[in-house]
Amino acid sequence: MKPNFLILIATSVIPFLIAFGWYHPKLFGGDNWTKIAGLTEAQVSNPVKVTKLLLTLLLNFLIAFGLYNLVVHESGVFGMLGADLEAMKTGTAKAFLAEYSGHDQNIGHGLIHGLVATILFVVPLLGYTTIFDRKSGKYFLVNLGFWMISLTIMGGVIAKWGGIPVV
């Protein structure tokens, strides 16, 4: 399998869509995100610049590409062959992919990988940030919930539609 970059780009928008609702002021019973994060009224009222939104979209794409490499197991064969598409169409690689490719191309498989990525990467990284930036447990849990939902949905989409068969 090779990456379906159109799907990876589309998947990069998922965290934006989830953030729209997740960080809405009416969520979390009045103890909203701005209070939990310690943001001032001036910071909240200042709109996010387009360059920062584009940078966030790029970061989301990197996350999507990383998830692709975790979720689509055939990408490991592609990598071992030096990303040579022709080598995947011949010999042992072709036989291996013909027998094993596509078994995990379903949403449930991707959801599990998204959850595992959350536990193995987001929890430690967010934990460090929360501890050393002296944020609250609520800050950790709100952000963890956001990333858990985002990564599980992204993983599901990528597992189902993120790879293009080459054999």
Image: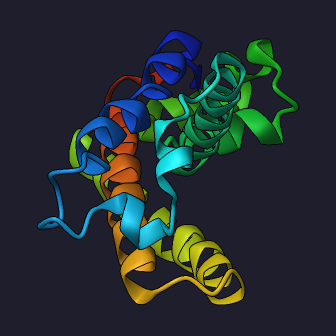
Position of the N terminus, as image quadrant, is top right
Residue drawn at (39%, 40%), measured in percent from left and top?
Answer: 154
**Measured from the top left, where is residue 44 in percent x and y?**
47, 45
> For the view shown, which residue lies furthest in the right direction?
82
Position of the C terminus, as image quadrant, is top right
Occupied quadrant, residue 29: bottom left
Q: How many marks?
A: 0
Relative to 83, is 78 on the left or the right?
A: left
For this rendering, which residue is in front, 37 or 10? 37
For this rendering, which residue is in front, 49 or 67? 49
Residue drawn at (77%, 12%), measured in percent from left and top?
Answer: 86
For this rendering, which residue is in front, 124 or 37? 37
Q: Is residue 126 visible?
A: yes
- The chosen color scheme is rainbow
**Measured from the top left, where is residue 46 in percent x and y?**
55, 34
Relative to 5, is 76 on the left or the right?
A: right
Occupied quadrant, residue 52: top right
Relative to 124, is 45 on the left or the right?
A: left
For this rendering, which residue is in front, 57 or 2? 57
* Vertical arrangement, residue 103 with respect to residue 163, above or below: below
Q: Is residue 167 visible?
A: no
**Measured from the top left, where is residue 4 in percent x and y?**
54, 16
* Vertical arrangement, residue 53 with respect to residue 40, above or below: above
Occupied quadrant, residue 27: bottom left
* Vertical arrangement, residue 74 with respect to residue 6, above or below: below
Residue drawn at (39%, 44%), measured in percent from left and top?
Answer: 155
* Vertical arrangement, residue 146 with respect to residue 68, above or below: below
Relative to 93, is 150 on the left or the right?
A: left
**Measured from the top left, where is residue 36 in percent x and y?**
40, 71
Residue drawn at (52%, 77%), measured in percent from left and top?
Answer: 123
